[in-house]
Image (cartoon, grey):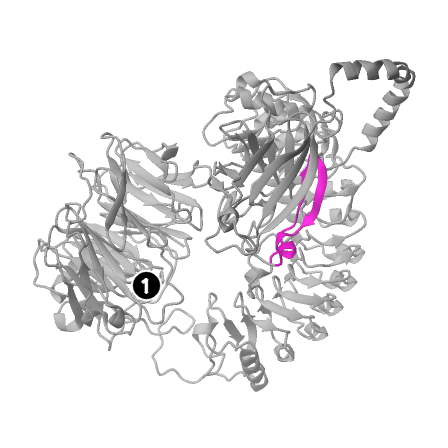
Amino acid sequence: MRNDLHMRNDYCPYFMPNGSMETILMDNVHRQPYISVAPFFDLKSSIHSAGARDFASLANLNCGVGIESTERSAIWELTEIKEPSECHTLVLPDKSLAGRVAGLIYSHSGDLILGLTHNATHKLWRWPSDQHWTGKENATVLPQIFQPSSGIVTTNEINAHPKNALPCFALTKTDSYLFSLSGGEISQFILKTLEAMGTIMLPPSPIATYLAILPRNNDILAIGFEDCSIKIYYLRTNKVKARLEGHQKRITFLAFSEKLNVLVSSGADGQICVWSTNGWERQANIFVQTAIQQFPDPPIVNHFEFHKDQTQLLAVHERQIDIYAAPKLEHLKKLVLQESNHPITHATYSCDGQSIYASFKDGSVGVYVSSTLGLRCLINLAAYTQPDPRFILLLLRLIHLNPTNLPWDSLSGRVHVLEPLESVGEWGIPPPPEDGNGHSMPLNVAAQQATDPAEVAALNKMIDYWNLKGSLNLTIDPCTQNATWASENANPRVACDCTGNTCHITHLKIYALDISGELPGDLFMLKELMDLNLGQNVLSGPIPAEIGQLSKMQYLSLGINNLTGPVPPELGNLTKLLSLSFSSNNFFGPLPKDLGNLTSLQQLYIDSSGVSGLIPQELANLKSLQTLWASDNLFTGKVPEFFGTLTELKNLRLEGTLLQGPIPNSFGALTKLEDLRIGDLGGEDSSLDFLENQTLLSILVLRNCRLSGQIPERLGIFSKLQQLDLSFNKLTGQIPTSFQNFDSLEYLYLGSNNLSGALPANIIGPKLIALDVSFNPLSGNLPIDFAKAGLTVNDVGTSINANSLQDKKAFGMLHCLQGSTRCSNKVPDTSFSIKCGGTTQTSASGIIFDDDTEILGAASLYTSSDYQWAVSNAGNFISNPNGPQYIVQTDSQITETLESELYKTARISPSSLRYYGLGLKNGKYSVELHFAEIAMDDSHSWKGLGRRLFDVYIQGERVLQDFNIRNEAGGSKRALVKTFEANVTNTIMDVHFFWAGKGTCCIPFQGTYGPLVSAIHVSQVSADTGSSSKSDKKRVGRLVGIAVGCVAGLVIISSMFYLWWKKEASGHMQIHTESPKKGLFQ
């Protein structure tokens, strides 16, 4: 979902029946028209307006001059609305008219409109419930203006010099609270009563110029200031979490994207910046380029917002509109005004993303086709009021289903609402259909060839079987030209080949629509199918052998379903296949050898499919294969040598299987690899000898592969590497000095090895975001630039000099993890409790769970303020559309517990998450681990098909393997407590949550996997029994001294053998033994 100027959710709510309204407001103080869209139920299209404009000058905008776009679209017939009889109008009631409205916003529920005037006064309109929900016309249903029961007008504080502060406000997701700013302090109100809750005290200088609220967390505000800075303010603690610096002039606009996990900012320097909401580092920035020499330099962006799918970002300034690809800010389109045109004051997407509304300084509105930026409709001021150059249009983006309604405010302070006539239904006349060659066709086109009747009958039966009539109701021939279901983006989609005398169905897509049941026999009547996409549904049962009859198939996707049975060998008959996916299902048995017949195959996705056994040698025939995802399956045997003959491979994933090493040297021939991920191998040790000429690699993950030997210097020539993960292996020697040459590397993971020496002085490259060298016998100092902005470092469990660290006390306590010295604490603790990912909570039994909301990066270590505990994270979620996110939360109630709040947040990690108890008294402890699966649901949708599996180690001992929270708890959002006992012998407790490559990777979205924990409570059960008196120790010493001397040599030999025998690829540290260092670097 997206958020605009006023932090509104920009999705058209799917539960709304017929729509609501887009709103245009009028502002006469700054002459700044402004647009928005709101959640109104059962309403026709409407516009709020005031102001007039010359039609000819606006029509020139559609001549194509200055428009940059690679897309071609049919031309709408330009419509001009200039008479009151051409639309419906409504004036919202307001007796006070105290000040001109600077902004309007609808509540998320759709029953309130909130206005903020330039003199900092709030206005609230409420629609009558008996009319608002009955579908009456918006232009005939008057809302009522609300006044607080106290009779006191609700206002903001205004700074003495607010010229650079744009009056703005933001609503929390639940419509509970309103945050408002007019140049002074930020005020907080209860929305539905406008009762003041308090203020956020800001210094008198610099002036706050804008604010935004993080949609997924109502406790975080972003506040822009006149001094170019942005402060991230945490409401619960009244603390500033981060200060963002990158602009050179005052902040003019802020907006969050919940889907992308970014904050976007603009400044008076003409710069747009994108910031991660996890680490608050800057991800991208651009300076807006002007297209007209006379345009002010720099151009100031007065508004931006995300498209409803958040793939595009609309940026508005007074002479042009730009569209960028989000979040990297790649430029896509530009609309440039001619010098004779009035300046743009605001622009916004319609709720369906198909249109863009732009307002102009004379008060008129242009409606543009978003794909081409072509003008389709002009709305004149005269359509709703007498022309008056003082009237200025203010467009404000809100949410609704009908993308054609708009509200406006005039010089008098009144808000006008407009909507098109029922006979028209939308702004502008749509283009006629095209003939396939880009030429418009008359509406009375001649009849075309008919579709094969057998295919039509089969298709209609499938529509009935899967209950799809609501979205695919074939009242005409399914192969009708330009049918709505034939476009490439349609879903469901039916497309045909009509080159012969009869049309045949060649493309069928029913994607992510939760169709259920088995694959029907009618499907195999579509013999001409070339592309079948049934992915992301809940289909069950086996794949019928008849699948082999679809011999023309090129693209087959059955991934993310609930299919069972063996993989049918008949798939080998589809020899024209280019792409095959049956990942994330519940098949059993081996892969059929017949898949070796698919010699044209380029993509094979079989991860998490349930298959097992040996990987067939016949797959060596797939010489065209470029992508192979095969992780999270029960494959046995050794990593196939023949993989090295698939020399076209670019992407290979082989994690979380039962395969045995070593990695064959034949992999050295895979020189086209760009993404290689192998992990969790057993058997023999592997080496890095095969890595020689794979210089195209951007992602190299060889985690937990029993790698031994040294890291070769030649890896430094892999200049395209962005992520390198060699963690949890047995690598020795020093970190190569060639690692100082990485210019593109962003993530470097070398933790849990046996690497020694000092870090290379310049290992922190220009793009490095995360460096993990934890649990290695490294020494020396951290590089001098280890504290650079945006970089996170994890060096726990090393001997790196503490003098280079900011928190020496914490480092000293964590140094006990190495076991090289015996540690003690003058005032030892006997318990600690942590609310993982959440704020401080007290349980019904009085246990205080500490706050754990610190934002962790991709290689982070954080120590609590009282030094009772610490947490470290290593790993990043590759390809996660939500960005780097290590905390998840839910608003749903958690069952099976009286402590629901304890489970509503959780820490997650893509690799390794460790919690450490510090300064503990030695002895036996009870370890309570609290879990609830809140990120994966267990609904009957495809989104409920995900599986999270991970391991848990306490004091180095694995206590849970392939742990599935949802299965153990009996469902999602159900509390589960696992209790264990462990010994503390050196003041440290280590609880390690580890991902071993298993579980689905991509449900409900890419990068959904890895450990999750809600809370931890550790308390002592009994004291250390080894702490007897000195006299007892002396007596025991006299009795056994001779015996110990006699067997000393035998003990040493036995210990050496024991250490050798205990070596494991996982590299987990043994802390609970008599010698805490034992097994540390294995």
Q: Does residue 108 belong to the magenta stretch?
A: no
Q: Position of residue 486 (x, y in %)?
A: 47, 72
For the record, the magenta segment spans: 946-970
Reply yes or no: does residue 957 show up in magenta.
Answer: yes
The quadrant the C terminus occupies is top right
Q: Left or right: 415 with respect to 874?
A: left
- Looking at the image, the residue that sits furthest to the right is 1046
Q: Is residue 98 left or right of residue 397?
A: left
- Residue 515 sits above or below residue 1057 on the image: below
Q: Is residue 884 visible?
A: yes
> Of residues 834 and 946, which is closer to you in this image?
834
Q: Is residue 219 above or below residue 573?
A: above
Task: State which quarter of the image contains the N terminus.
Answer: bottom left
Crowding at mark 1 (Cα within 10 Å: few <14, some 14-19, many 20+): many
Using the rendered view, name the quadrant where residue 557 is placed.
bottom right
The percent position of residue 439, horizontal first and vertical second, equals 37, 71
Q: Amino acid at mark 1?
A: His
Whether residue 567 is situated above or below residue 907 in the rendered picture: below
Q: Secondary structure at mark 1?
A: loop
Residue that appears at 51% across and 33% down: 769
Q: Which residue is mark 1?
A: 400
Q: Is residue 994 left or right of residue 762?
A: right
- Quadrant position of residue 952: top right
Q: Let me know if residue 736 appears in the view.
A: no
Q: Is residue 764 left or right of residue 65?
A: right
Where is residue 220? Give x, y as percent. 38, 42
Please tell me whether residue 472 is drawn above or below residue 674 in the rendered image. Answer: below
Residue 221 position, x and y percent, is: 35, 41
Q: How many marks?
A: 1
